[in-house]
Amino acid sequence: MFISSAFAQTAPAAAAGGDMTSSLMSMLPLVLMFVVLYFIMIRPQMKKQKEHRAMIDALAKGDEVVTAGGMLGKVSSISDSHIGLQIANGVDVQMQRSAVVQVLPKGTIK
C-alpha cells in the first residue's frame, strides 16, 4: 500500500578517485573558455588602451589631431587634462586630452 523509499547507491571506494577526475574534466571547458576569452578580447583591448595612453602622453604643441567627435585641428596649448585645439584661424576650443583619437602626420591640415 505504501511505496517504500528508494536510496541511491553509494559509489564503491575504488571509484572515489574517479569522482575527482570527472569533476576536473567537467570544469575543463569552462577554464578553456576563459583562456580563449582572455586572448581574443581582453588582451588586445588592454594593448590598445596602452597605445592610446602613450599617444596622449606624447602630444606636443603643433601636432595635428583628430578628436572623437571628428574634429580636425592643431594643438595650440597643453595642460594636464585639457588641450587647446585650433580648428581655424583665430578659433580655439578646449577639449579633454582623452578625446584625441589619432595624431595625423604634419601638413595634413591645410
Image (cartoon, helix red, strand yellow):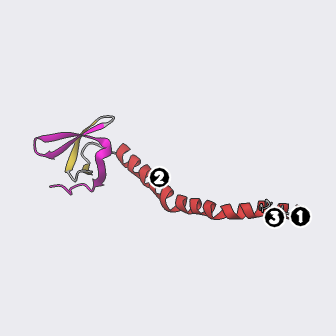
How far apart, in angstroms, are the residues tagged by discs 1 and 2? Answer: 48 Å
Identity, as a three-letter code, of the amino acid under mark 3: Gly
- Name the secondary structure under disc 2: helix
Tell me the residue that label 1 is attached to. 14
> Which residue is depicted at the point 10% across and 41% down?
90
Residue sitting at 49 percent across and 56 percent down?
42
Q: Give whichever of discs 1 and 2 has the lower sequence position.
A: 1
User: What amino acid does circle 1 point to?
Assistant: Ala
Task: Indicate the secondary structure of the residue bearing disc 3.
Answer: helix
Q: Which residue is the site of mark 3?
A: 18
Single out the residue that lies furthest toward the left: 90
Q: Do the CB atoms of the residues marked 3 and 1 lie less than 8 Å apart?
A: no
The stretch in magenta equals: 82-110
Report the residue marked by disc 2.
Answer: 46
Residues packed near mark 2 inside 10 Å, few (<14), some (14 to 19) or many (20 plus): few
The residue nearer to you, when weighing 109 against 48, is: 48
Residue 108 painted magenta: yes
The residue type indicated by label 2 comes to Met
Give the percent coordinates (x, y) of residue 74.
Answer: 21, 47
Give percent across and percent down for residue 61: 26, 42
Q: Is residue 61 left or right of residue 14?
A: left
